[in-house]
Image: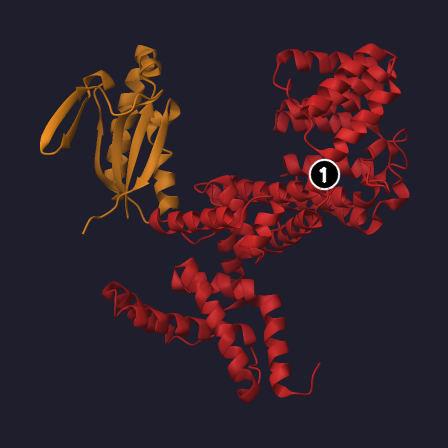
Amino acid sequence: MSEDPAELARQTVEAVYRSDSRRVLATLIRLLGDFDLAEEALHDACRAAVEQWPHDGVPTNPRAWLVSTGRFKAIDTLRRRARFDASLGELAERLAATAGDTTAPDLEELEDDRLRLIFTCCHPALPPDAQVALTLREICGLTTEEIARAFLTLAPTVAQRIVRAKAKIRDAGIPYQVPSRNELGERLDAVLHVIYLVFNEGYSASLGESLTRADLSGEAIRLGRLLLELLPEPEVMGLVALMVLHESRRAARTSPSGELVLLDDQDRSLWDRARIAEGVALVRRALGSRRFGPYTLQAAIAAVHAEAPSAAATDWTQIVGLYDVLLRADPSPVIELNRAVALAMRDGPLAGLVLIDALLARGELAEYRFAHSARADLCRRLGRTAEARASYERALELTRQETERRFLVRRLAEVAP
Amino acid sequence: MKYLCTVWIEEAVLNGLSKHDAETLVADSLAYDEELKRSGHFIAANALEPVNTATSIRVRNGKASTTDGPFVETKEQLGGFVLIEARDLNEAIQLASKIPPARVGGIEVRPVRELK
């Protein structure tokens, strides 16, 4: 750190901004009742800190200082604008009247502000892509440009989604609050879904070229951990566990030349043991609550894989059993497919093939590339090379991802006539 | 805030209900109106006649043109409405989810815009 007080103050502001700006924003949104006004107030407060802290010294509670300064800056802004719009004057005076209360807000209230922000950004009345954009912008503090790059879209598109979402929050009266007990389950599902969506976007992209996209997984895990800290519900534990367990295999998922490596063929010594230990511990806690759901069950399956020394030595009976429970909790053809693959590991490829053929005959998975590649794999193991070829070719037609395409081409070569 | 909860149902589904189910739906709807009145959320509510009774009117250059039918032909038709007073969208969603025809159709919740 520098000796120069101005430089020192600037560094302190930066450090506080990095660690606390999202908390300050969350509280300002509650106090001011408006996202844009709160963002502007946060920026004004930070600018004031850079100007004042070198002379006046760094306040004992920098976060509280930023909240209170931001609030007064917003009142000033509204008073200035009131010259053009009288209704803003009333708002400014109303805010000023309550701002006189200088007692430090209690810690619990401030933590609740972060939860309020999460539940508001992930409100099911907002379109899903707007929930994701708003969450990454307001809670994670990503810029619209960063979000656009991560989702391979244009910054103006992301900006527009955010503007529309904020307009709906204001005009439809979406409240800034943590849902009540009886709504919590459904509303929490929406939040978990957004986090998982962000994670998957980063996880599947990590095979591709762009490194910025892989950062999304890290962002999702940070978000999950924040939620876990604020709301330690079993399914939050389950989701964080699921994400860290997947993440533990990142280094083993691609070969040094960037090729896709399937779970069975991965070098398990590359798996991140610290992450596995964290994931397994969370799964145990979630299962112990007896109030767990689909995320915990998926994490439990990932944990069985993580603890197995090799594909052959995996406890496939337990995995099939977990899929049975998962299917009852959350019926879906994709889970049926995964169960069929696990069953093939337990009872042999033919048993799995019968299930997959029945699934494909129902039609829901006809366009799902993994159904065809799984079928191809079982046929290959049964020595039915012609059928294996046809299914690999179908999977190849359906895949859009370069690394996956190269993987299928290699497999196809193995079953060439 | 005021919210208009419009009730959307496929008329074929409504007509296909058994006599008992149809009567229950009407009785439940009337009972829910009373419940909303007691809790202070009620402003107005009505069911609508089938969509074949609808007439659409536009006025252009001072001249009214009248056509048969609703503005938009949709799979589900506007079958009724409940106008409520609610603290915010979360309360409006809670109240709207208990409107009985939500069981057979759907409810759209829209905040009322006060024109000044």
Outermost residue, front side: B61
The percent position of residue A4, horizontal first and vertical second, equals: 65, 87
Q: In this view, does A367 lie to the left or right of A111?
A: right
The percent position of residue B63, horizontal first and vertical second, equals: 9, 30
Q: Look at 72% across and 16% down and name the residue there.
A: A356
Q: Nearer the viewer, residue A290 or A194?
A: A194
Above or below for A371 versus A130: above
Q: Is residue A286 left or right of residue A269?
A: left
Q: Look at 87% across and 16% down and name the residue there.
A: A416
Above or below for A96 versus B1: below
**Secondary structure beneath disc 1?**
helix
Residue holding disc 1:
A299
Judge whether residue A340 can be spotted in this image: no
Judge whether residue B113 can be spotted in this image: yes
Please give the chain letter of the residue carrying mark 1.
Answer: A
Q: Nearer the viewer, residue A206 or A179?
A: A206
The percent position of residue A135, horizontal first and vertical second, equals: 54, 51
